[in-house]
Amino acid sequence: MRIAVFGAGAVGGYIGGRLAQAGIDVSFIARGEHLQAMKEKGIRAESICGDFNAQPNIITDDPSQVGEVDAVLLGVKAWQVSEAAQAMRPIVGPNTFVITIQNGVEAPTQVSEILGPDHVVGGLCKMICFITKPGHLRHAGTEPHIVFGELNNKHSERMEMLLQSFSKTTGLTAEVSTDIWSDIWKKFLIIAPWSGLGSITRSPIGVFRSLPETRQILKRSMQEVFQVALSHDIDLPKDAVETTLAFLDTLPKEGTASMQRDIMEGRPSELKEQNGAVVRLGQTAGVDTPINAFIYHSLLPLELIARGQLQF
């Protein structure tokens, strides 16, 4: 398969790097200093699964230099999805499919509206990974795992082909989902409460999951996400909140979410697509989300500053 990573940042860079390391035909579409560093030395990663260097076949900021590919791994931030879907048209052929791995639950629909639903595959990835300097990643926690599946949950040959490509990698596991929307929301149940509370408290997960007061807020935020999911006919286990909270207890105590890091460092974040989405999707279904509303509205001034829309 020919695979393009559109948005080869931390997560996209790690996954694409592992594919390139395995000999898969991979192209990176990136930008800025990160792009220039990768052009010179490829992608370098420190990982709890083993450090590696990899050299994708093409590294560029111009999709037209890549040509049509079989699959696009969409690695941009959730707030960049619509713009990226428009920009990737030069690499999308009649049979190309795009795997959305962003945090949040709205990316598959956004890409479908631009490229058509037949070109979209739902996905998600689990790992704690960030850029330490241009061209250099650090995978600091959670065994890297990618999940993908057709939006109608039907078995397909293209999912099997993609799985075969991932089966050649090391330091990364993959699976085809039997209910991708459920799996996307299960990830959302993890990341939105974690991101929001981490951003509000400015503390790593080991702190706010341990204090009884903040742990209760974390759980209430998760319960809101759960209720919103059910209101949108998402099939989640009845014990999803309890099992997810137990999973969060296993994460490295120093772990931080990417949205939290962006907010703390003054960058635009996925606030609207995470806690904001809980509020927005709750409103459309008549579900109250007071905890996520408080988180979203409290962090909104910082988000507007980061986007140059507010000064004080």
Image (cartoon, grey):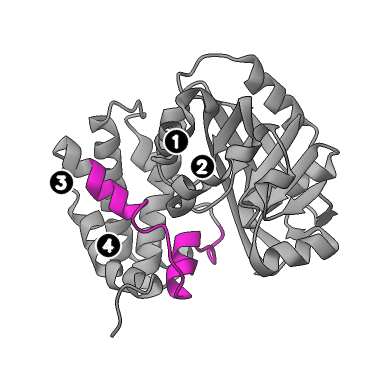
Disc 2 is placed on an element classified as helix
Residue bearing mark 2? 85
Count neighbours of disc 2 (C-alpha within 10 A) and say few if under 14, some if 14 to 19, many if 20 or more: many
Residue 164 sits in which quadrant?
top right
Q: Do callouts 1 and 2 mark residues in contact (Cβ within 8 Å)?
A: yes
Label at residue 189: none
Residue 192 magenta-highlighted: no
Q: Quadrant of the C terminus?
A: bottom left
Identify which amino acid the numbered label 2 is placed on. Ala
Q: Do callouts 3 and 1 mark residues in contact (Cβ within 8 Å)?
A: no
Identify which amino acid the numbered label 4 is placed on. Ile
Magenta-colored span: 252-281
Residue 16 position within the rendered picture, expressed as x and y whole percent measured from the top left: 72, 46
Disc 1 is placed on an element classified as helix
Question: With respect to residue 83, does 307 lie above or below?
Answer: below
State which tag comes first along the sequence, 2 or 4.
Answer: 2
Residue bearing mark 3? 288
Residue 67 position within the rendered picture, expressed as x and y whole percent measured from the top left: 72, 38
Label at residue 295: 4
Q: Which residue of the protein is positioned furthest toward the bottom in this rendering?
A: 312
Residue bearing mark 1? 114
What's the CA distance linking mark 1 and mark 2?
Answer: 7 Å
**In-front residue for pair 246/255:** 255
What's the CA distance linking mark 1 and mark 4?
Answer: 31 Å
